Amino acid sequence: MQILSREQIQAWDQYTIYNEPIRSVDLMERAATCCFDWIRAQHWRGHSFKIFCGKGNNGGDGLAIARMLLQAGFSTIIYILENGRPGSPDFQENLQRLHEITTDIHFIQSENIVISITETDIIIDALFGSGLNKPLSGIAALLVEHINSAHAIVVSIDVPSGLFLDKSSKGHPIIVADHTLTFQVYKLCLLVQENAPYIGRIHILDIQLHPGFLKDNIFHKELTEPALIRSIFKPRNEFSHKGNFGHALLITGSYGKIGAAVLATRACMRSGAGLTTVFVPRCGYSILQSVAPEAMVMTDENDEHLSSLPGDLDKYAAIGIGPGIGTEEATQKMVSFIARRYTMPLVIDADALNILSLHKELLTHIPADSILTPHPKEFDRLFGDHTNDFDRLSTATAKAAELKCIIVLKGHHTIIATPGRQIFFNNTGNAGMAKGGSGDVLTGILTALRAQGYESEKAAILGVYIHGLAGDLAASKLSMESMLASDIIEAISLAFPQIY
Ligand SMILES: NC(=O)C1=CN([C@@H]2O[C@H](COP(=O)(O)OP(=O)(O)OC[C@H]3O[C@@H](n4cnc5c(N)ncnc54)[C@H](OP(=O)(O)O)[C@@H]3O)[C@@H](O)[C@H]2O)[C@@H](O)CC1
Ligand SMILES: Nc1ncnc2c1ncn2[C@@H]1O[C@H](COP(=O)(O)OP(=O)(O)O)[C@@H](O)[C@H]1O
Ligand SMILES: [K+]
C-alpha cells in the first residue's frame, strides 16, 4: 500500500472527482457511508453519539455521519466549532441536509465549553483532517482538551484532529483517539512512533478513490504487504543442495552476551542458510556447540571478547556482525578492519553500529549495499540526535542514499530506507517483541537471506516482515507478555508457509 503525502491525497480526491467522475459531495457521502457502516458494526446501541465538526470537509464528513446515525435511530447531538466564516461548500450542503432532520445542532463559539461528556458517550471527532495548516489554539485547543479529559470512546475521522499528516505535531493539542477511521491509505502520521499516544486502532476504509491515480504517479513510501513479500520470496528448487543456499558467517558474542550469538545463529539456521558458521570468543564455544549443533563454531584467541578475524572472509556468502560483541578496543579494531577491507555487503547490528558511532569516519568505508539495523538510540548515536521521528525518517532517507546502504530503523513499524530513496514501512510485529534478543534474531534472519542470494534491499524487506510475522505467531500462541526472542525463532518455521 502506497503512503501518500497531504498534497498527493488532495490530488487523488480531485483526480477521482474528475475521472470517475463523481461530485465532491457524493464522494464525501461515500466516505461518510464507510464510516457509518463501520460504526454500526460496533454494536454501540445504547450509547449516544456526540459529533464534533470543524467547518472544512472533515467537518462535512462528520455532518453526513450524523445524518446517517439519526436516520438509523441513534441518539445523536452535533457540535460545530464556529470560526465566523462560511464552511466549505460540501460542509454547507451537508449542514442543510442535516437541518431537515434535526434541530440538535449546537455551535461552539466561546472559550467556556460546557458540553457534558459521559462515559457512555461515543465521540466522533470530525474537527480537522488533512486540511490542518497550523497547530490548534484558542477554542479549538480548549475543545480538544475538554474531549480528552472525558472518558468516552473517541472515534477520529481520517486523522485525530490536531495531527499534521506529514510533519511532527509534538507538543501540540491533539485528540486522543481510540479508533481512527482513515480513508483509503495509511498516512505518515499514523505510522510513526511519536504519534502512538493519539491514534488508537487504525482502520483503513476503502472509499474507492480512482485506481488510475496510483498508476499515473510515482510514490516513494509504501507499507509492505503480502503481495510485495510474495513477489520477493524465492521458493526452493526441488533439486537444490546446501551449496545453493550460501554459507553465512555471524561475528557475535562476548562474555555475558553469548546469548546474542546463540539467538542470531539459530535464527540464521531457521531462515534457510545452507551453512552457518558462528565466530565467538572462546567462552562461547561449548555453549554454541551444545545449543546449536547444526552450526560450525570458530573461536577467537581471546576468552572474553573478539579481537581477531575469523580467517578468510571471502569464502562466506554473507556476514552478519554485531550482536553482543561489546565495544572493547580490540573488538573495535576488528570491526574497523572489516568495515575498511571487506567489499561484499554486511549486515551490521548492535555493538558493531555503536563502534561505527565511535569512529564515524568508518561509515564512509562500509561496503555498498550493507544493511544497518539500528534501533532509534543506535540511529541517533550514528547520525546525531533527533527531536522527532519525521526528522529521523528524513535522515534515514538521506543517509541510505549517501552511504549507498539499506538502513533498517527498528520500531513498531520498522522503516527500511534504500539507496534509491524508497521507504518501506513494515506492518508485522507486536509489542511482545519489545524484549532483549529480538534484534539479534533479526540479524540472523537477514544474514540467512543474504546468504541465499537475496539482494540487500529485498533481504531487508522480506527479513523484517518475516521477523515480525514470526513475532505475531509467537504472540498468538504464547501471549505478548510471555513470548521470548527464542519463541520468535521457533515461529519462523510457521511464518515462511504464510508467504508461499
Ligand atoms: N472530496 C474530498 O476532497 C474528500 C475529503 N474528505 C475529507 O476532507 C478532509 C479534508 O478537508 P479540508 O481540506 O476541507 O480540510 P479540513 O481538515 O476539514 O480543515 C480545513 C479547515 O480547517 C481550517 N484550519 C486548518 N488548520 C486550522 C487550525 N489550526 N485552526 C483552526 N482552523 C484551521 C481551515 O481554515 P483556513 O485556516 O484554511 O482558513 C479550513 O477551514 C479529509 O481529512 C477528509 O476527512 C473526505 O470526505 C473524502 C472526500
Ligand atoms: N512494539 C513493537 N512492535 C513491533 N515490533 C517491535 C516492537 N518492539 C520491538 N519490536 C521489534 O523487535 C526488535 C527489537 O530489536 P532491538 O531493539 O535491537 O532489541 P535487542 O537489542 O534487545 O535485540 C526490532 O526488530 C523491533 O522492530
Ligand atoms: K478528525
Image (cartoon, rainbow, N blue to C red):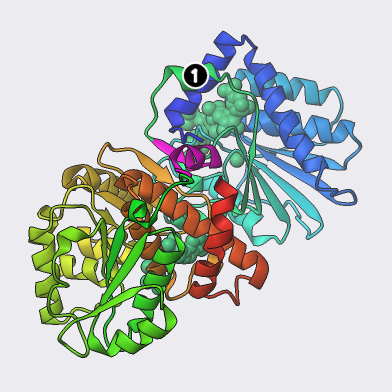
Task: Answer above or below: position of 37 versus 473.
Answer: above
- Which residue is painted at 85% across and 22% down in the image? 100
Percent position of residue 440, x then y: 38, 69
Instruction: Tell whether circle 1 marks a residue whose Cβ is less than 8 angstroms from ligand 1.
Output: no
Viewer-proximal residue among 122 and 260:
260
Viewer-proximal residue among 43 and 212:
212
- Which residue is painted at 48% across and 44% down in the image? 235
**Could you tell me how many numbered marks the image carries?**
1
Percent position of residue 133, x then y: 44, 35
Highlighted magenta segment, given as a residue range: 221-235
Left/right placement of residue 398 relative to residue 23 reads left
Amino acid type of disc 1? Answer: Phe
Left/right placement of residue 434 relative to residue 30 reads left
Task: Answer above or below: position of 24 versus 142.
Answer: above
Mark yes or no: residue 84 visible.
no
View extreme (front): residue: 239
Viewer-proximal residue among 209 and 163:
209
